[in-house]
Image (tube, grey):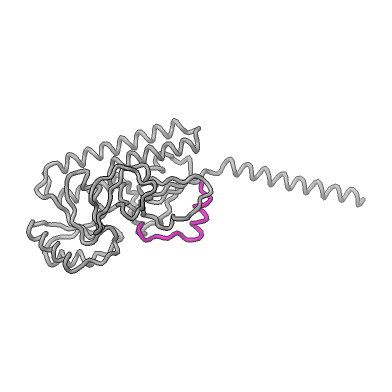
Amino acid sequence: MKKIFFISIIALFILFLTTIKQNEQVDSTTSKQAVALSTFSLYEIARHVADGTVETFMILPLGVDAHNYEPTPKQVAKLYKSDLVIYNGAGLEPWIDGFEFQNRAINMSQHVDLKKLSDDGHTCGDDHHHHHDEAAANIDPHYWLDIQNMIKATQIISQELIALLPQHKELYEKNRDSYIDMLKKLDNEYKDTLSACKQDTIVVNHNAFSYLSSRYGFKVEALSGLSPEAEPSAKNMAKLIEHVKEHKLKTIFFESFVNDKAIKSIADEAKVGVDVLQPLGNITADEAAQKLSYEDIMRSNLSKISKALECR
């Protein structure tokens, strides 16, 4: 009797182990691959191209400024386990230095055209070499505001998704092409709208728009340099007030996630309006609830910039 009982226990134990193994196999075949992206613009590309075939998630929480974010231990663990990580690079994520990924990680700044910064933190010109080894401190990281760079990023992300899940190659290529078509149309809208303008300069509190201004032929005067946290000097504030008055500008801008106190002081002194430009490193919870896309926000930016430049 004891022998039969012992054999039954062993049989039940073997059945238990077999059931666990089968469940693990089911989980591994049904769970989606995890793809992490560090900024909203990169995240949106991946979400559009992948079309639900992978779990895409943005590393930045909604409403958090990309320049100052540090991931939590829980997010670090999730990043480590992700099947693919694509991050902005160019110094935007200082926490990435020394981070070891379990699987493939892509520094997107190595695949786009970048701009160097002058000593005062302003963009000083094009640099079409990819910065694999150069210190990122000399690079303007806001390259996603150049639509040509977004096209390049779309191509790279599509390649990586195809390598990850080749069975969806046809879907990814179709979605890639539709997203690039949208970007090309958006590029043409910017060219057409900003082709003839009375003014040639916009005033902002933080210099995030140099890629955009360089591409479409206008200038940017910024209250602070690259860092949104930089304290503006009294001299620079006085200079911008003089510029606004001299050129009879009607609107000056501050960006999402940035303190607007200084720029509003300039607006009050110069007696001009203030509006918001979205630099698209991240979006707010409200913008996410409205399901606003890169295209939607870039069109909104275009409308505001064209109005400020008094374009015909």
Residue at the image point whose x is 36% and y is 53% from the top: 135
Residue at the image point whose x is 12% and y is 61% from the top: 272
Quadrant position of residue 23: top right
Quadrant showing the C terminus = top left
The question of residue 77 being in magenta is answered with yes
The question of residue 216 being in magenta is answered with no
Image location (x, y in percent) of residue 21: 68, 44
- Left or right, residue 169 beside residue 90: right
Quadrant position of residue 193: top left
- Left or right, residue 280 beside residue 192: right
Residue furthest out toward the bottom: 234
Vertical placement of 214 versus 180: above or below? below
Residue at the image point whose x is 40% and y is 57% from the top: 94
Image location (x, y in percent) of residue 87: 41, 49
Range covered by the magenta-colored residues: 66-82
Residue furthest out toward the front: 134
Residue at the image point whose x is 44% and y is 49% from the top: 57
Image location (x, y in percent) of residue 274: 18, 60
- Left or right, residue 232 beside residue 154: left
Residue nearest the viewer, comparing 303 with 109:
109
Please, what is the dominant secondary structure of the magenta stretch? helix
Residue furthest out toward the right: 1
Image location (x, y in percent) of residue 95: 43, 58
Vertical placement of 72 versus 306: above or below? below
